[in-house]
Image: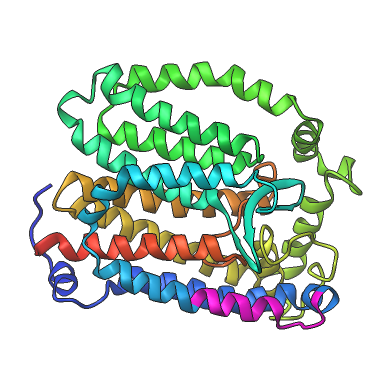
Amino acid sequence: MKKPITHSNQTSASGTYDIPLMFPVLFLVGIGIVMVYSASSALALKKFGSDFYFLKKQALFALIGILVLVACKHIPYKVYRHFTYPLLLLSIVFLIAVHISGLTYTAGGSTRWIRIGSFTFQPSEFARFSLIIYLAYSLNKKMADIKDFYIGFLPHTIVLSVFTLLIFIQPDFGSIVILGTITWMMMFIGGVRLLHLATSLVLLLPVAYLFLTSAQYRVSRLVSFLNPWQYPTDEGYQIIHSFMAFGSGGIWGAGIGKGYQKLFYLPEPHTDFIFSVIGEELGLIGVLIILSLYFLILWRGISIARNAKDMFGAFLAIGFTSAITLQACINMCVALGLLPTKGLTLPFLSYGGTSLLINMACVGILMNIGASRTQ
């Protein structure tokens, strides 16, 4: 883990912010505010009587998110080790509270949110954050015995299974995929036996098959994914209109605010399918810019992990970086018809306070890990 001190490390350690990481994040947040307004104005006007409804809330989320980023940047990342198990317990309480009458908020047929007054909170986002901290702490602590099945593999799988069960009954298959992939990836990087990891994948295949075929709407999603044009008015409706958005955008796009698919054709244009609105209004150039910004986050996150001064920091950096970029990849692949619909938002761009605040906290912690390299 010992690396030569570079100029960028010296700069980070002096107290300034990690520009190669902060630039793409803030750029994405800025683009997100503009595109959330463009994608939601017609919907907000019809539903709430004001086309600025989602814009004002997203701008407020962004402001609070920046404050969260700054706070997390100045909190030593090692502090989170002491809160590992309280965070896990709190996540489980939140995931159970989703199903308590009076707190539940349901949308799109899924019960994924807690509502208290006008405030809504998505526990699965917090669970992802807590799981990464737990995995980083546990893998670092068990490095000497990581090859042992009962030490390096089983405990982490049990924690993942608890989260998976609680999220499954919401249901939220997209979050389950992300949590499972992150756990597998972090255990692989941590040195857990490949035999244990590979065996777990083989055993999960029949379980995944039963899950996918146990509900008609999931079967319909898979069938429409393979041939959406066969079901243009129901299961294939979303992806067909997403294709139309990208197709009409061309190279340069129709222009911000000039897209048509957001006008009650494309469902959830400001959340799940905001990437499609970007494709229509900003064109191929806009899409490539978005991809480049996420690549910068991935590159910088990996660099921070490689240069972390301890394994706990390295595991945290890998976990947070993979969580952000994996969710972005899945969302964009869904919008492009490369994956079945998952109901996942696009980090920093889609409307949603919980996702934005958690991701900004992750970026702040990443900055602290990078800044701690030479301290």
Examine the structure image and report whether residue 163 is included in the region drawn in magenta. no
How many marks overall?
Answer: 0
Q: Residue furthest right?
A: 233
In percent of width and height, residue 322 lies at 41, 49
Picture quadrant of residue 244: bottom right
Please give the name of the residue rendered at 77% of the width and 67% of the height, measured from the top-left corner.
248
Image quadrant for the C terminus? Answer: bottom left
Vertically, is 267 above or below 42?
above
**Residue 252 visible, this angle:** no
Vertically, is 196 above or below 14?
above
**Residue 243 visible, this angle:** yes
Give the colouring mode of the picture: rainbow
Vertically, is 185 above or below 199?
below
In percent of width and height, residue 338 lies at 65, 44
Vertically, is 81 above or below 263?
above
Which contiguous range is marked in magenta?
48-62
Side of 15 where 91 appears, left or right: right
Picture quadrant of residue 153: top left
- Which residue is more in the foreground, 366 or 161? 161
**Which secondary structure type mostly characterizes the magenta part of the structure?**
helix
Side of 47 where 324 appears, left or right: left
- Which residue is more in the foreground, 316 or 32? 316
Please give the name of the residue rendered at 9% of the width and 63% of the height, measured from the top-left corner.
374
- Which residue is more in the foreground, 130 or 257? 130
In percent of width and height, residue 296 lies at 39, 63
Please give the name of the residue rendered at 82% of the width and 43% of the height, measured from the top-left corner.
228
In percent of width and height, residue 108 lies at 76, 51
